[in-house]
Image (spheres, helix red, strand yellow):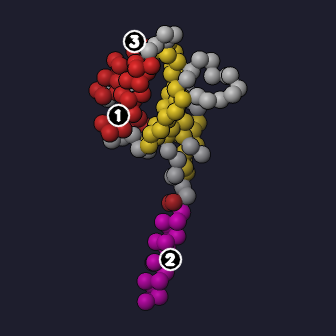
Amino acid sequence: MKTLKITGALVLLSVLTMSFYSFETTNKNNQITHISADSVLRHVVLFKFKDGTAPEDIKKVEDAFSALPSKIPEIKGYEWGINNSPESLNKGLTHCFFLTFENEEDRGIYLPHPDHKAFGEVLGPHLDDVLVLDYWTK
């Protein structure tokens, strides 16, 4: 019975330790990224549309991007919105799309995915500029 209690305590301690684990990884630019067990990979995409893009064309882009989470199961979280900052520092970028992935492998499936590529076809004729930023949450 005593052995069972000690074994149970060790298992519990192991589980608790693993839930707080973290590690570092080095990317292709030799930058070290600290990743903890509860980190997720955020993929932030900002668009600037060409001058004169019709509102209905912008709506098609919004709808096409918003359809991706239902088509690509690797997308674990999704939200989007239109800039409303009073600071006027957006450099013409108006739309922010915010995706969450569990890991880089899932993002790696998303990027060349046929549905993501098809979305690019909808977006392309209307896109003036884009900014993409990915980061691991801390």
Question: Looking at the image, which is closer to me, 105 or 58?
Answer: 58
Could you tell me if the residues under marks 1 and 3 are in contact, i.e. CB atoms within 8 Å?
no
**Disc 1 target residue:** 67
**Disc 2 target residue:** 9
Q: Secondary structure at mark 3?
A: helix
Could you tell me if the residues under marks 2 and 3 are in contact, i.e. CB atoms within 8 Å?
no
**Disc 3 target residue:** 125
Identity, as a three-letter code, of the amino acid under mark 2: Ala
Give the distance between the C-alpha atoms of the residues marked 1 and 3, in whole angstroms: 19 Å
Q: Residue at x 41, y 24 (%)?
A: 59
Q: Please provide percent x and percent y for residue 60.
A: 37, 23
Q: Residue at x 54, y 40 (%)?
A: 136
Q: Is residue 88 left or right of residue 99?
A: right
Q: Is residue 137 left or right of residue 1?
A: right
Overall secondary structure of the magenta stretch?
A: helix
Q: Please say if 50 is above or below 64.
A: above
Residue found farthest to the right: 87
Give the distance between the C-alpha atoms of the residues marked 2 and 1, in whole angstroms: 47 Å
Could you tell me if the residues under marks 2 and 1 are in contact, i.e. CB atoms within 8 Å?
no
Count neighbours of disc 3 (C-alpha within 10 A) and say few if under 14, some if 14 to 19, many if 20 or more: few
Q: Tell me the magenta residue range.
A: 1-17
Q: Please say if 41 is above or below 17.
A: above
Identity, as a three-letter code, of the amino acid under mark 1: Ala
| Nearer the camera: disc 2 or disc 1 | 1
Q: Please provide percent x and percent y for residue 99.
A: 46, 37
Q: Please provide percent x and percent y for residue 137.
A: 56, 43
Q: Secondary structure at mark 1?
A: helix
Query: Is residue 10 on the magenta stretch?
Result: yes
Q: Earlier in the sequence, mark 2 or mark 1?
A: 2
| Nearer the camera: disc 2 or disc 3 | 3
